Amino acid sequence: MFAVIGVQLFKGKFYKCTDDSKLTLADCKGTYIVYEEGNIDAPQIKEREWEPEKFHFDNVAKAMLTLFTVSTFEGWPNLLYVSIDSKDENFGRIHNYRPIVAIYYIVYIIIIAFFMVNIFVGFVIVTFQNEGEQEYKCYLEKNQRNCIEFALKAKPVRRYIPKHRIQYKVWWFVTSRPFEYTIFVLILINTITLAMKFHRQPDFYSTALDILNMIFTSAFALEFVFKLAAFRFKNYFGDAWNVFDFIIVLGSFIDIIYSEVKPGSGLISINFFRLFRVMRLVKLLSRGEGIRTLLWTFLKSFQALPYVALLIVMLFFIYAVIGMQMFGKIDRNGDGEINRNNNFSTFFQALLVLFRSATGEAWQEIMMSCAATDKVKCDPVVRNDTKNDTTCGFDIAYPYFISFYVLCSFLIINLFVAVIMDNFDYLTRDWSILGPHHLEEFIRLWSEYDPDAKGRIKHLDVVTLLRKISPPLGFGKLCPHRVACKRLVSMNMPLNSDGTVLFNATLFAVVRTSLRIKTEGNIDDANAELRSVIKKIWKRTSPKLLDQVVPPPGVEDEVTVGKFYATFLIQDYFRRFKKRKEQEMKDQGDKESHNTVTLQAGLRTLHEAGPELKRAISGNLDELIDDNPEPMHRRNHSLFGSVWSSMRRGHSFNRTKSLKVASTQIKISPASSGDFLPYNSIQKGITEGMNHITPIVKNAVFQNRASVTSLHNQEGLKDEESIPLRSLSNVFTNDADKKSFEVIGKSGFLHPHYNAPHSEPNGHAGPERLSHSLPGSPADRRPTPFEVVGSAESLVGRVLAEQGLGKYCDPDFVRYTSKEMQEALDMTQEEMDRAAHHLLQQERRINVQTLDALQSQL
């Protein structure tokens, strides 16, 4: 498309006359004078010629060749200026005649050179990566395969720790952090001093630099002596970095000695050895995680580069041989790009020409210097072999150089980029993903717990080891112990009989859990699939190592680290659960206690307002005399406790009621009668007055129910008296009743109901008509002895009945009263029912304890 547009724009317009004074084809005739190199004493006469540019747009083929050279960014500025100066066909150039045509080149470069060519390069890289993945054809990603390969091939390193006391102290000194940091500072300062030389420096300045050089050499020599004493000869030279340091020190001494023996020698300066000290900066920078990762990736890239380099060498060899045969006879003394430094006369020279063309340096000019034109002459030495043909160019130069440039620059050179990107892909992804570059840290820290490189450590040390390693490989220092234990449960390495775990099994488990390699589903099936993949990809893996890293399906009672830490987590969870439940019970108890006190206050208020309610309902507005024996704010009532009331009365009169039992009377005050007798008061009264009870009373209490009921009927109930003491009227009359009551009462399952009196027209309640259900509750919903029922309304009904409002206590009145109290106390119905049930439970326990005490006294 661009070639066709170029032909329309520039066809026949890239010509000019060799005589710049002539602009048209018609004027470009005859001869003209040329002064070579400005020498006016040697003029030369030449013929005028109408010549085209080397690259033009006269036809589509030439236009495509021209645009291809533009896409390589070689020689395109010259074409741009020629296009701007062009005017018409068969007309010469006019400076800046139409600059608008520059848009053509700009659009072409943006679309083709920037986008399409790079898309082609990206396609090459993606295809290279996909072809590499086709070899494996498994569910493992490249990063997962690299980590698994590292875990399978890794070996624990020996960490030398001397046993001699003095040697150990020296070893501890040279391996300490302060010593390493001191050496690093010396390396940095020494590097700075090496960069301080300059031309024509003063003598004193040179002397100062020499003195500093001796100081640094002495310091590095002392480092060598200390490390050799700490590690001994074998362990010292077993480390490549130590060998490198030794060579630097040795070169520094040779430098000093040679400078003193032969100063100013004309040979190559021995100071060149000093420059190797700069290489120690690599050792300094390798301590940083980022630089270490970069160096690791750089070295890994070199492992794949030899294959690409071999392909390039083969391509260069083929094209060099063809170039020697086709273009080896071109004259090297001409004006073109083929000259004595750039030619195809020998194999080595051909390789240099091809390497220059591969870098894109004026490759199109070399191509045109080898094409079949009149300017490409043959070498006079070999002219006889050409049968007196003066031209040695070939049109095959066009496909030769274009194909070489496409194959080399667009394909093979970009394979280097593909290889490097393939190893550097993790630099552009999330750093939280585990990669092979992280695993070296595991080997280094493992040696601290396994200095002899036996390949096993205690399973308890694994937690400490992984806490020292930062994520994503390890847990990190801030990882909670329970989270670390959960990770170890998922790792589930085999546990040896001596409580140790193996090196490769631990490293493989870390990789597997971090990258989630077959960690879901049935573990035996997952292990079987993973074992088959390892056998397929890494065929040389020994069966013993495979069984260590991926155990085969075995017996269920095999001891593993996962089972050990799972037991620990279960115990820890149970302790936490127990503690949490205890705290919840405590909080719930506090809340129920608060609700109970609140309900007591509400019942007390209702109890104190009872007489006024009765007067309002009955229409008797006369002032009633309060019969309460104690002040209202100290009323001793089990339902109200010690809650003070804000409704106090100014008058209080003691009044007692009599219960006749066989001509013997027991006087009970209203405050201590009924179901609401507090245990302290009853126990005290029983203890003080038990001796006054006659044997007739004792017999009356434990005889049949009829005698007690008849005595009760004889006495009767007055309209304004409290509910009778049910414990004395309906308690056990034989051993069976007594035992039954004791069991039910002490178990705390007594249902909260009260015996509502059946009101007679005269205001008396007949004891034989006592109801055993909740106020207003239907007969079919009466609670069983072991049922916990909603008891808030029952308590409200009891309080109203105590105040002489029993005949008004229909279910609606009790329900509305309970609802008003609920809203006033800001409590839910459930909270009121639970608080009421709690009050009744306490009351039942008090009654049972009171009867037990009464029974023991009788």
Image (tube, rainbow, N blue to C red):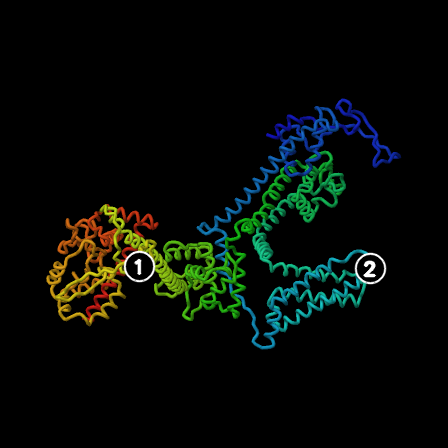
Q: Nearer the viewer, residue 748 or 711?
A: 711
Q: CA distance from mark 2 to mark 1?
A: 113 Å
Task: Name the residue type under label 2.
Answer: Pro
Give the label on residue 589, or none: none
- Residue with the mark numbered 1: 631
Task: Please tell me whether residue 771 is drawn above or below residue 683 in the rendered image.
Answer: above
Residue drawn where x is 60% and y is 72% of the image: 171
Residue 554 lies in quadrant: bottom left
Residue 728 lies in quadrant: bottom left
Query: Quick check: marks 2 and 1 in contact, CB under 8 Å?
Result: no
Q: Residue furthest bottom?
A: 165
SS label for mark 2 = loop
Task: Please tell me whether residue 644 is drawn above or below residue 855 in the rendered image.
Answer: above
Give the label on residue 202, or none: 2
Residue drawn where x is 55% and y is 69% of the image: 159
* Mark 1 Cα shell of 10 Å, populated few (<14), some (14-19), many (≥20): some
Residue drawn where x is 51% and y is 57% of the image: 471
Q: Nearer the viewer, residue 699 or 763?
A: 763
Task: Name the residue type under label 1.
Answer: Pro
